[in-house]
Amino acid sequence: MAHEDSLTHAIDWDVDRATFEANIDSLISLATDNKKIIPLPIAIVKGEPFLEMVIAITMQVDCNGCNAHCCRTNPDGSNISMAWSDYDQLRLKHTEEELHNKGIYIRGATCVFPSPCPFLMVNTCRIYDDRPFICIMYPISNPARDGTGAPMLAVESSCPEARRIAKKLYMDMWLLRERVRARGK
Ligand code: SF4
Ligand code: SF4
């Protein structure tokens, strides 16, 4: 899941649509090929709604057609680290023995899930309402940095829906900026 450093980037919005689209395709391909995250054109500003923005993005993810890639493989090949609070949540409905038998264990301040996830059954999460925080947030990743170093929302490039949503966001944003600019003339 969230795993890689961001690509520090700067976006040139003042180009024609075809050039902009080619630049965005290149940004997404570069991130995917290098197993990096994809920065989104949304700044993270202290005091502004963050979870609302995250939900607005994750709600657009349509997992139909994907083989639960994110639940089968951690991009770096390691087990998946969850927060201690996720383990507490699971213990409300599962005994420690059950969790242990699924290969879930505690290491320091984190709860470690094996990969593939033991709660995945035929592409469906069996603990959907109690799934760990990192699963709720996915494919949102750690923040990226824009050309000035400011934090930006970002998504995991290994998720096909994240790539689709990132492209759509950039293209919609370019169009909106053009319309706003035209109204100002
Ligand atoms: S990798 Fe993306 S599209 Fe596939 S199951 Fe996970 S969130 Fe859904
Ligand atoms: S807990 Fe559910 S959503 Fe999270 S990795 Fe496991 S199967 Fe996937």
Image (tube, grey):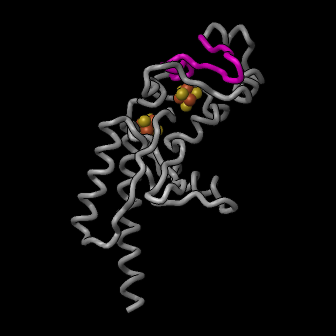
> Residue 168: x, y in percent?
37, 58
Where is residue 134 shown, x and y percent of the image?
59, 35
Question: If the image is split into quadrants, where does the C terminus sit?
Answer: bottom left
In this picture, is 27 found above or below 170? above
**In front here: 159 or 48?**
48
The structure residue drawn at horizontal position 61% and vertical position 19%, both measured from the top left corner, is 112
Q: Quadrant of ligand 2?
A: top right
Closest to the observer, 63 or 29: 29
- Magenta stretch holds residue 105: yes
Figure quadrant of residue 62: top left
Image: 29 above or below 53: above
Q: Is residue 131 magenta?
A: no
Tell me which segment is drawn in magenta. 103-120
Placement of 78 over or under 124, stated as above or below = above
Residue 12 is situated, as x and y percent measured from the top left of the image, at: 33, 66
Q: Which quarter of the figure has residue 122?
A: top left
Q: Position of residue 78 (x, y in %)?
A: 48, 19
Residue sitting at x 41%, y 67% = 173
Residue at x 28%, y 64% (from the top left corner): 20
Residue 6 visible in the snapshot = yes
Residue 147 or 117: which is nearer the viewer?
A: 147
Above or below residue 20? Residue 39 is above
Residue drawn at (46%, 25%), measured in percent from left and top? 74
Q: Is residue 125 visible?
A: no
